[in-house]
Amino acid sequence: MDGPMRVLVTGGSGLVGRAIERVVKEGERREGEEWIFLSSKDANLVSAEETRSVFQKHRPTHVIHLAAMVGGLYRNMRQNLDFWRDNVHINDNVLYMSQEFGVVKVVSCLSTCVFPDKTTYPIDETMMHNGAPHESNYGYAYAKRMIDVHNRACFQQYGLRYTAVIPTNIFGPHDNYNIEDCHVMPGLVHKTYLAKKEGKPLEVWGSGRALRQFIYSVDLARLFVWVLREYDEVEPIIASVGEEDELTIKDAVDAVVEGFGFKGEVIYDTSKSDGQIKKTASNAKLRKYLPDFKFTPFKAAVKETCDWLAANYDIIRK
């Protein structure tokens, strides 16, 4: 491509979008580049008309597609149809308009929930379509899988190199901290903040035994920029810490408790679901490309997240 990139980031005001904005400001931007961070206030991407008008307005050369209808385990279990329909519409609109407006490259964000529920571990990029996803969030998972189908078909029919990143459990500043409706880490951070403030026990949903690989949003942002610039495959790539860095939810609870200096009681409510007990992912492909990439140490990233929430409590999404 000749000339500087004009990058449109959908979902630009969310967890990963704000992290990309931060790393771009802190030195990832190259001379002449333009970065446009869209939020849901700028356009409802479920609407083909509104998506088209955004592409007409900004005429991007590259797109990082983060926008999605997202929620935690319990909301997914209640609203699988909504998650399926809204995300299928959003993804089709963004990918189709990218093709129509001559976008050189799109990097979309998937999730490890796209992988089959019944599988062998560790999971790798080749296993996405090998069986049904976990029943708790199949609507969201199938909608995200369809991005990969769209990308393959786009390459086959038009030679376009649109691809996707598959992160493991993301956390960091600017997350959705709504306790009824968020992912595990922001839920723990918000609950621990409130428990400390109110002098009450910390109640954790589930047994604490489930295993997860956590990735700090700022690390993921750096990887997204690398994928946009350097990664040339249509096949997706898993963005994750290694299998050796997989933690239990209890490990995560302990790190958040330490991050806030919480001294109260911690109670595990085992009547609540653990979701998938494990979904260990391999980062061998990422390491083949980036053997020296340094992830932020987990406890340091958790502490930064806790400090950010405490400093910004009045304005967080809750």
Image (tube, rainbow, N blue to C red):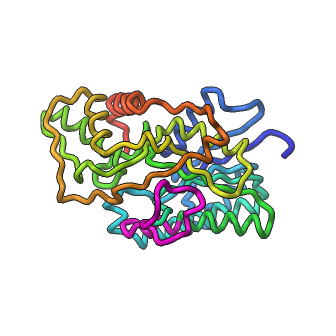
Q: Is residue 291 above or below residue 49?
A: above
Q: Is residue 258 left or right of residue 142?
A: left
Left or right, 28 with reference to 17: right
Q: Residue at x 27, y 42 (%)?
A: 250
Q: Work out whether residue 286 or residue 162 is closer to the camera in this orientation and state it.
A: 286
Residue 42 seen: no
Residue visible at 72% across and 49% down? 62
Q: Position of residue 46 (x, y in %)?
A: 55, 65
- Is residue 292 shown left or right of residue 191? right
| Residue 121 on the magenta segment | yes
Q: Nearer the viewer, residue 104 or 286?
A: 286
Residue in the image at 30% along x and 39% along y: 251
Q: Quadrant of residue 255?
A: top left
Q: Is residue 254 magenta?
A: no
Residue at the outermost right position: 2
Task: Estimate the x, y position of residue 256 in percent, counting from the top left.
Answer: 30, 34
Write down the region rendered in magenta.
Answer: 117-143
Residue 105 locus on image (x, y percent): 73, 52
Q: Tell me, yes or no, if residue 79 can be seen here.
A: yes
